Image (spheres, coloured by chain):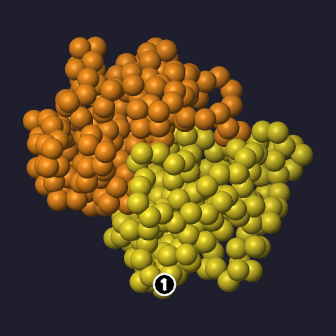
Chain colours: A orange, B yellow
Amino acid sequence: MQLLKERIKKEGRIVSGQILKVDSFLNHQIDIDLYNEIGKEFKMLFSDVPVTKILTIESSGIGIACITAQYFGVPVVFAKKAKSKNIDGEVLTSRVDSYTYEKSYEIMVSSKFIKPEDKILIIDDFLAKGKAIIGLNNIVNSAGASVSGVGIVIEKGFQEGGNIIRQMGLNLHSLAVLDKIEENGDIVFK
Amino acid sequence: MQLLKERIKKEGRIVSGQILKVDSFLNHQIDIDLYNEIGKEFKMLFSDVPVTKILTIESSGIGIACITAQYFGVPVVFAKKAKSKNIDGEVLTSRVDSYTYEKSYEIMVSSKFIKPEDKILIIDDFLAKGKAIIGLNNIVNSAGASVSGVGIVIEKGFQEGGNIIRQMGLNLHSLAVLDKIEENGDIVFK
């Protein structure tokens, strides 16, 4: 997605060598016009598969999932990371090791909201080691439902997540795949 | 907002006497059509004040803020609850006591994204004791910016948050104000 790649090149910042920060438009401050272009792109890429619900994970996937859902005409469900009073009853869970937060955590979805007949499109902002997507896929499987596709905004192509997800046979589309970050900080896409 | 109140009466569930759960359409599974009606209502209610950015807090405010921002044509900024690699540089912080999570936590916004000239509309899903809104208001004030309004989807009118926020002189609009929850579980609106 050319518009996204241009935006990453223009506003993305590299910190600590390998961490791409896109907080001015994607995951802290949010450019809603860009989110709409992302939503349209996902609709085009997944136009040939059935989608009854979009599943994402808190927090930075939620906004992208909501704007994207407008183009599919389906509800969003977001997996929660911490047990609170706001989730009760029977839950589907999976454990995720987080690269960003350097800890592992449980993700959970109320079993009411994913049924065996659901065709799920998983949406998230980043794909690095693939742990969050594997956790979401586990939750969909444990509900007896199926994953129609996985839509990622930015895939870090130099980490293993993309290969793992593709080898699992999941229908993955990433809107921008980073090939490498040069020593001078230049971002190269695949 | 009549549509919202009808939906709360139809699908809201009361647990432990005082906790209203609206997880089938508002904050776990999300009805995007309802979010759009909420966004239009906020635009109508705040049409007479300047708004340059919408500020919310992760996680359940993000989707509402993103859909609402489409009607204002402004970016969204969401406050983060945990220090991660995804936030760096100078940050604006405030401490919040959470009713839902029974603990206190720091919320933070990168100082790059709220400037003195900004006119901020704060959006959140629930207002109970008002702690999150006070924290967001503190962050806006510490940036030297001003709060044009506070838009809440569901205000628990039997808790003190609404009065506190109004007494602070903030321009608060709540789309549904709960008056009380009857012993039989009936929900009464103000």
Name the residue: 28% across, 25% down: A161
- What is the number of callouts on the image? 1
Question: Which residue occupies the extreme right position in the image?
Answer: B183
Q: Is residue B58 above or below residue B114?
A: above
* Residue A87 rendering spot, x and y as whole percentages: 65, 35
Looking at the picture, tell me which residue is in the foreground, B79 or B36: B79
Q: Quadrant of residue B190?
A: bottom right
Q: Is residue A116 above or below residue A159?
A: above
Looking at the picture, tell me which residue is in the foreground, B1 or A85: A85
Name the residue: 74% across, 51% down: B99
Looking at the picture, tell me which residue is in the foreground, A40 or A8: A8
Name the residue: 10% across, 35% down: A190
Chain letter belonging to callout 1: B
Name the residue: 63% across, 75% down: B172
Q: Which quarter of the rendering shows the N terminus of chain B?
A: bottom right
Looking at the picture, tell me which residue is in the foreground, A180 or A122: A180
* Residue A180 rendering spot, x and y as whole percentages: 15, 37
* A163 displayed left or right of A147: left
Q: Quadrant of residue B127?
A: bottom right
Q: Which residue is mark 1?
A: B49
* Residue A111 rendering spot, x and y as whole percentages: 57, 24
Label 1 SS: loop
Q: Is residue A30 above or below residue A50?
A: below
Residue B162 in view of the camera? yes
Residue A116 in view of the camera? no
Q: Amino acid at mark 1?
A: Val
* Residue A117 rendering spot, x and y as whole percentages: 43, 20
